[in-house]
Amino acid sequence: QQQVKQSPQSLIVQKGGISIINCAYENTAFDYFPWYQQFPGKGPALLIAIRPDVSEKKEGRFTISFNKSAKQFSLHIMDSQPGDSATYFCAAFKMAGTALIFGKGTTLSVSS
Amino acid sequence: ETGVTQSPTHLIKTRGQQVTLRCSSQSGHNTVSWYQQALGQGPQFIFQYYREEENGRGNFPPRFSGLQFPNYSSELNVNALELDDSALYLCASSLDRGSNQPQHFGDGTRLSIL
């Protein structure tokens, strides 16, 4: 059973466009939702994170939108750049837990 | 500030062999978690160590074992290697355990089993 479902699997966006990646979860015990960015040959790097008491968090060009009632959250990348081309993972962490539960990832390609 | 470092970066083993992977946590971090990332997949939690004790374990068999040392560095040991163990093994450290402490990843060890 996949606890965190991520879509789409791949995404192609033109330079300057908005990239949107969606995630859904089932377990209401999750209380921390980070997004990681991974380049080929590198480990995942923490990009931005949100907790369920906040509906939106913005850091530079990256915004997380969080819908607690729908159990969904999404990453928006504004003014997408070729350097943003990478694999993005959403994740969830359970209150009093130990493990990050990852989605399957979205490969983003930003064309110039 | 030094980030999470892992060694070796690449390793090739054959079925049935044993392997040890190493991780140095970020300065000041007392919690280390290990993840397995198969090609094209998200990382899967193996286990976590907090102050030298195992603090949680994912759905991996006992031939996956670990250690954490007094300086909070850590090892992942895998016995009786199988072809399906071929993956990127990631170590993540955090300031403390719990969801209020972000996990920061190293660049991983790429393990190939022949």
Image (tube, coloured by chain):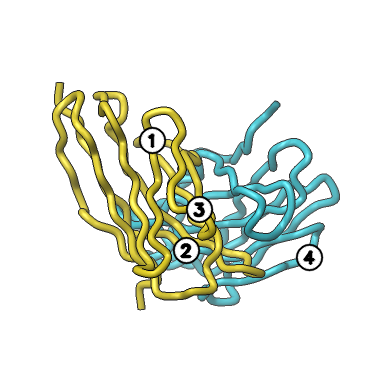
Circle 4: residue type: Glu
Position of residue B60 measured from the top left corner of the image (x, y, whole percent): 52, 73
Query: What is the quadrant of residue A25 in the picture?
Result: bottom left
2 or 3: mark nearer the eye: 3
Residue A54 disc label: 3
What chain is colored yellow? A
Q: Which residue is mark 4?
A: B53
Instruction: Give the residue at x 40% y 74%.
Output: A26
Instruction: Give the residue at x 55% y 43%.
Output: B105
Q: What kind of element bears circle 3?
A: loop
Q: Which residue is mark 1?
A: A62
Query: What is the quadrant of residue B98 in the picture?
Result: bottom right
Instruction: Give the residue at x 74% y 52%.
Output: B96
What chain is colored cyan? B
Name the subunit of mark 4.
B
Circle 3: residue type: Val
Tell if the residue under mark 1 belongs to the same chain as the one under mark 2: yes
Do the numbered discs 1 and 2 sit on residues whose CB atoms are within 8 Å? no
Up-down: is A85 above or below B70? Answer: above
Circle 1: residue type: Phe
1 or 2: mark nearer the eye: 1
Give the alpha-carbon distance from disc 3 to disc 1, as whole Å. 15 Å
Do the numbered discs 1 and 4 sit on residues whose CB atoms are within 8 Å? no
Q: As rendered, which of A91 and A54 lies closer to the eye?
A: A54
Do the numbered discs 3 and 4 sit on residues whose CB atoms are within 8 Å? no
4 or 2: mark nearer the eye: 2
Circle 2: residue type: Ile
